[in-house]
Image (cartoon, helix red, strand yellow):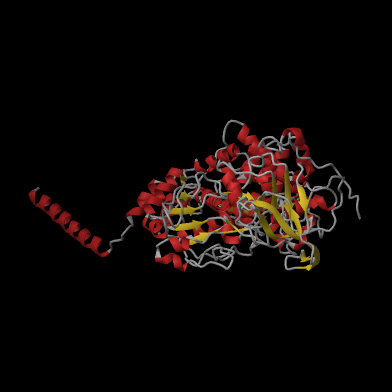
Amino acid sequence: MIPAILLMLGIGATCGIVLSLASKVFYVYEDPRIAQVENNLAGANCGGCGYAGCSAAAEAIVSGKEAPSLCIVNSKEGVEAVSLIMGVDVGAAEAPLSYNMCEGGNRAADKYHYMGVSSCKAMASIFGGHRVCTVGCIGLGDCIKACQFGALYMGPDGYPVVDDAKCVGCGACQKACPKDIIQVKTLTEQLMKFNQTYDALAPCAQTCPAEINIPKYISEIKAGKYADAVQTIRMRNPLLLSCGRVCPHPCEDMCRRGIEDEPVSINQLKRFVADYEMNSGSRIPITCAPDTGKKVAVVGGGPAGLSCAYFLRRIGHQVDIFDAMPKLGGIIRYGIPEYRLPKKVLDWEIQGILDLGINAFTQVKFGEDFGLSSLVASGYNAIFMGIGAWKDYALGIEGEDLDGCYKGIDWLSSFASGQEMKLGKTAAIVGGGNSAIDCVRTLMRLGLEKVYIVYRRTRNEMPANEVEIIASEEEGVDFVFLAAPTRVIGDDDGKVKGLEYLKMELGEPDASGRRRPVPIEGSETVLDVDMVISAISQAPDPSFKDTDPTPKIKDLEMTRWNTIDNDPETLQSSIPYIFTGGDSATGPSLVVTAIGGGRRAARSIDLFLKGKPVEPVENSLLGKRIPESIFEKVDGITPSKRAKMPEIPVNQRMDSMIEVDLVLPEDQALAEADRCLNCCRICYNPDTEFPIAK
């Protein structure tokens, strides 16, 4: 018995030694992160990610082949945990969703009759498919067949519809589509999507500086889905209440209906749903991507700065806004009067942006109270400069420093700030833009006996919004056209008593395409006024370059117009981590242009923060139009009356700063939405079953 036990112990010891040696020779290291990652996956082993189970998926994530969001059924918390294990930017772990870029479908005419295999891929091999539209959906449903989760179905109009509740973002539909029409994108990718030459876009959406999907939000209004319409607009424009009141709507100039009829009142419909949310008593929730841990300083809280901050926050970055004025809003607060944009409306809109988790520091001026070095030292990874254009141009004539002379933006901002204003009895405002109109309409409400606009060209050349010009005419403003001021005349006390101007006549067109005014010799004329406001234009104030002691600030290049020199596609300045947008980048422009610039800068900042090349959008449509989408005639249109903006009557609005333009009633808004042709690149919904024009 004892020998047998000793033999067994000897054999066991020998095996142990052999196995110990073998473990040293044949040892295979397994990264401990694989088990940690697997423990934070869904554990379903469904194979929807393309790997044979969660273990294989975990190996792919740890090896760097796949992103932390690989698991298509994982929770947000699970994805964040995997990101933390891998030490990667959590923002990259957003859950993707499918969305369809074409809503043309059966509306697009056929260029040939197809009798082949019922597959989009097969049909696409023959001249790109049977549709006349070069970028449209073929409609045979390869994407639907590829989806294992029932998240896609063929809609009644011949293009696939995505069920967001069922979509897991696996990407099978995108791989199946031969034309890249259905795509899988994260929230960040959708927010940072810019118009490209191969997109299926209506002419109005191509023209909108903010690149809003106009036909989509109007169709949502038509269906009574007002909250959805608000969210569609907010994917591109966070200031829809403000834009609904002050935007000159260049999109309407390209409305396809306007070729045969009056264009759709796009901006009034934007205001309708914006006011719907504000008056509903609650805010529609705005989703943000997971925090990235990156910090961005936004200098300037005007439209461009607010837009940039909004989009940066939505894609996961921490944002702080610094502004020199007591309240945020910039030119739309201090340059646009109360009767056009009530401050309580602006306050409500800005608060919604700040509620996303954005900090605001007011009454701090860049270059004086803080500078470039303090921002860098505070840990900001990038800086957006949206300092606006607050410096008024001078007339450059004798006497403009007399008591009673003012400059447009300075005067408007002082009035908006609540300062006590010294007023005369009669005033002349020099200029023909929106600031000039804002000055005259404000002065009329303050009770002056006579207010003139003095403009060196004719009414046709005035750059102000047409509706504002008409309103000022209705309110009793006097226009003095073809008049170039030559000097301000003062009395013995140094106070204004008149404005001398030279009569003009129009000559040949200048670089702007407008006929150049030419003076008529000996035509000097004097207007008897005791107040003169010059509102001829503005420029950014570059004084921060002199007051900021940071040596690096000298490397920030400026143009001869005092704008921050930048790449117009990326808005990156000569200092790589400084970006710009709005009036400080372009000079005085539209509010909606500044909003679009803020979003474009946010995209570039996001690329910079991720260590990626800051490059322009591929095949960008910026400043361009898709030729095949621009029609000369539109068949099937039955003329219908465009909705008229309701407004407070003139005799009820001149003794206060009450808002003049009102929102459309719901029935009129729905009727106006029904006028929209729901255009895509080349398709649209005619009013009549058969074309009425040949």
Given residues 497 and 352, the one toward you in this image is 497
What residue do we see at 84% from left, 45% from top?
687
On screen, residue 658 above or below 580: above
Quadrant of residue 567 in the image? bottom right
* Residue found at the very far left of the displayed protein: 2
Is 364 displayed left or right of 4 in the figure? right
Quadrant of residue 512 in the image? bottom right
Q: Is residue 210 shown to the viewer in this render? A: no
Given residues 683 and 170, the one toward you in this image is 683
Residue 479: image location, x then y, percent? 77, 51
Given residues 544 and 452, the one toward you in this image is 452
Is 238 displayed left or right of 634 in the figure? left
Q: Is residue 111 shown to the viewer in this render? A: yes
On screen, residue 128 above or below 218: below
What residue do we see at 80% from left, 64% from top?
506
* Residue found at the very far top of the displayed protein: 281
Is 456 displayed left or right of 54 in the figure? right
Q: Quadrant of the C terminus?
A: bottom right
Residue 61: image location, x then y, percent? 43, 56
